[in-house]
Amino acid sequence: MSGELTGRTLLVTGTTGIAAETARMASRSGVRVVVIGIDTESGESLAREVGAEGGDCRFLEADVTDPARVAQVVSVCAADLGRIDALFNVVGISGRRFGDGPLHECTDEGWDRTFETNVRSMFLMSREVLRRMLLQEPDSDGMRGVLLNMASVLAFSPSARSFATHGYAASKGAIIAMSRSAAAYYAPHGIRINAIAPGLVRTPMSRRAQDDPAIVEYMRVKQPLPGGLLEPGDIASTALFLLSPAARSITGQVISVDGGWTVSA
């Protein structure tokens, strides 16, 4: 379905895992991709990799929790690309290393860092991109643009056994609420907004889980379709469909890509 985006422009926040795989898949299909994040090494490496394969992928360094830098980067993208067709907000963290956990143990820093990275970044990127999209003429499908935000199954299908990070779950719940509310407001303007809610995916952020034999075994039951962890491409392929004109009648939805998580014990 990513071919439906051919010739269009896509901004992706994040430089590894799901963000990187989305950039790869989109670029192979003729999409102009701008990857935005703070990790210069992985961002530049991704852009070189995609460029070597003949794709069109740029990297722009930016702390997406900084409103001034976000405004600057989006302005550059709009000026260079002429139009921003799609935004995929992927950047996020597990706040565990900062003290996220069960509410009675969660630290102030754990809560604040998690919300700053996971929610504030999406608010700032969405605000700036929406300002640009509202000024754009509708495309051949009658749309001005589309946003997709990264949520998580933990926002509505908790797992106390292995994933008791309540700040993280709350941040993903906030993302879902923001996405649905904004979708209702911007639909009359020809702008679609959805959220995607993955299960446990094999990314750098999930390294702790990947290295825990008990969690790996639990995932064989909790995510029976892949028989364990999902791969970044499982999420990226669905994301590209939701970002494409093929999904032009879908907005305000939360799409779970969880390998069976929400229907398993």
Image (cartoon, grey):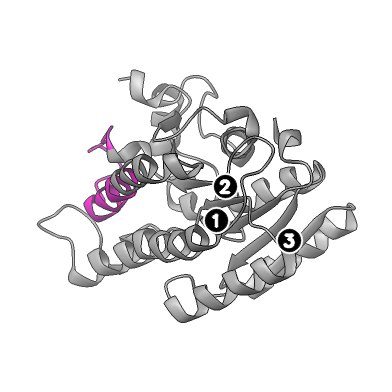
Relative to residue 163, is residue 47 drawn left or right?
Answer: right
Give the residue displayed 52% in from the left and 27% down from the top: 249
Quarter containing the C terminus: top left
Give the residue displayed 27% in from the left and 34% down from the top: 156
Mark 3 = which residue?
Answer: 46
Quarter of the image for residue 215 reads top left
Q: Position of residue 105 (x, y in %)?
A: 14, 60
Relative to 230, residue 146 above or below: below
Mark 3 residue element: helix
Residue extending farthest to the left is 104
- What amino acid is found at the position of numbered circle 3 in the picture? Leu
- First reached walking from the N terminus: tag 1 or tag 2: 1
Mark 1 residue element: helix
Mark 1 = which residue?
Answer: 133
Q: Badge 3: how crowded within 10 Å, few (<14), some, or many (20+)?
A: many
Of 8 and 259, the residue lying toward us: 8
Relative to 135, residue 7 above or below: above
Q: Position of residue 186 (x, y in %)?
A: 41, 45
| Segment colored magenta | 156-176
Quarter containing the N terminus: top right
Contact check, label 1 and label 2, Cβ < 8 Å: yes
Does the stretch in magenta take in 116?
no
- What amino acid is found at the position of numbered circle 2 in the picture? Gly
Q: Position of residue 50 (x, y in %)?
A: 81, 56
Does the stretch in magenta take in 171?
yes
Mark 2 = which residue?
Answer: 145
Relative to residue 99, is residue 21 drawn left or right?
Answer: right
Relative to 42, residue 142 above or below: above
Q: How many marks?
A: 3
Q: Nearer the viewer, mark 2 or mark 3?
A: 2
Contact check, label 2 and label 3, Cβ < 8 Å: no
Mark 2 residue element: strand
